[in-house]
Amino acid sequence: MTEKEARRVFKQILAAVGYCHKCLVVHRDLKAENLLLDAKMNIKLAGLIYGIIEILNSIYCVMCFP
């Protein structure tokens, strides 16, 4: 992979994670195995993705059941 290609892929990863965070979604298992490439060599995030509801449920459970 050339430096130019690596830069493009890295920007796509940052954009994907930024979009998830903007939508109040966190990816709690971001690693190379969870980065997929489509037919046009664009990055797709895979793996465990949690929304704000899951986070709030966890906080609620910790607060209610010490």
Image: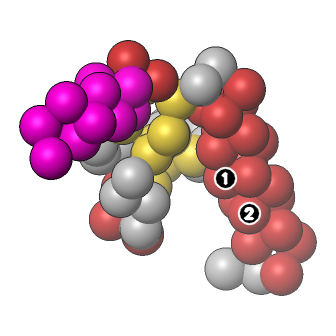
**Circle 2 residue:** 10
Which element is circle 2 on?
A: helix
Query: From this viewpoint, is residue 5 visible?
Result: no
Here the colouring is secondary structure
**Frontmost residue, 57 versus 27:** 57
Q: Where is residue 25 in the image (x, y as percent from the top left)?
A: 52, 29
- Amino acid type at mark 1: Ile
- Amino acid type at mark 2: Phe
User: Residue at 64% across / 20% down in the picture?
Assistant: 23
Q: Dividing the picture into quarters, in which one does residue 33 lie?
A: bottom left
- Magenta span includes 19: no
Furthest residue in direction left, as rendered:
65
- Magenta span includes 56: yes
Q: Is residue 31 found left or right of 61 in the rendered image? A: right
**Frontmost residue, 60 versus 20:** 60
Which element is circle 1 on?
A: helix
The alpha-carbon separation of the residues under discs 2 and 1 comes to 5 Å
**Circle 1 residue:** 13
Q: Main secondary structure of the magenta part?
A: helix
Q: Dividing the picture into quarters, in which one does residue 40 lie?
A: top right
Q: In which quarter of the image is the N terminus?
A: bottom right
Q: Where is residue 29 in the image (x, y as percent from the top left)?
A: 35, 58
